[in-house]
Image (cartoon, rainbow, N blue to C red):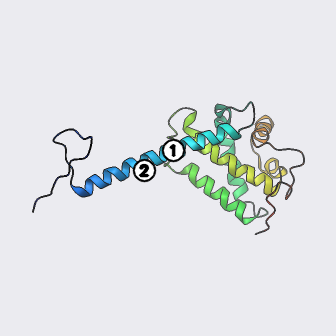
Amino acid sequence: MGLVGVVMIGSPVGLSFPPDAALLVQLLIGLVVALAVIWALLLLTFAVLRPKGVVLADAARLMPDLIVLAGGLARDRSLPRRVRVRLWLLLGFMASPIDLIPDVIPVIGMADDVILAYFVLRRLVRAAGRDVLARHWRGSPEALAAVERLLRCHPDDVAGNGGDQSNDQ
């Protein structure tokens, strides 16, 4: 028994797909549209939440140091478990070849990594204080100052003082 063709609305005349393939094409198009919307929302979130004077290119230049920082922090047993889990997930996302924006695109290719790193490290500072950044930082002091500016660290950001005061070790 042969396959019955279904012509998709808007398809060129004569182009037909089996019913299952037509559904698959529609699902793939829906997935691509959903990912595009999520990507746009992430970029908009970064644009709204980033500190004044910070541009994506500056943040992208910090990525190698941030990866080393996240690795050191993820292995630090003095940090709460929930924070370490977030850091391991961040490292896994950064290492994953699956990105919302391909990393081969200059500057904006790291946008999804930068945005996610911002949120994870900001939560870290709120949970553990800003001194934990300096303790694990391996880059230059100027780069650390830039990261602290990006994360909006303040001198009063000490462990448990940033609003994330749940205590699940």
Residue under the image location 60 percent in, 45 percent down: 113
Q: Which mark is residue 31?
A: 2
Q: Position of residue 1 (x, y in %)?
A: 9, 63
Q: Which of the marked residues, 2 or 1, is nearer the chain's N terminus?
A: 2
Q: Out of 119 and 140, give the one closest to the viewer.
A: 119
Q: Quadrant of the C terminus?
A: bottom right
Q: Which mark is residue 19?
A: none
Which kind of residue does numbered mark 1 sit on?
A: Val
From the viewer's perspective, is residue 80 above or below residue 91? below
From the viewer's perspective, is residue 121 above or below residue 1? above
Q: Secondary structure at mark 2?
A: helix
Which class describes the residues within 10 Å of circle 2: few (<14), some (14-19), or many (20+)? few
Q: Position of residue 159 (x, y in %)?
A: 85, 57
Residue, far left: 1
Q: Position of residue 23 (x, y in %)?
A: 30, 55
Residue under the image location 66 percent in, 62 percent down: 85
- The span from disc 2 to disc 1 (Cα, nearest Å) is 10 Å
Residue 166 in the figure: left or right of residue 101: right
Residue for badge 1? 37
Q: Quadrant of residue 114?
A: top right
Which class describes the residues within 10 Å of circle 1: few (<14), some (14-19), or many (20+)? few
Q: Secondary structure at mark 1?
A: helix
Residue under the image location 19 percent in, 47 percent down: 16
Q: Out of 75 and 116, give the one closest to the viewer.
A: 116
Q: Out of 166 and 129, give the one closest to the viewer.
A: 166
Which kind of residue does numbered mark 2 sit on?
A: Leu
From the viewer's perspective, is residue 39 above or below residue 87? above
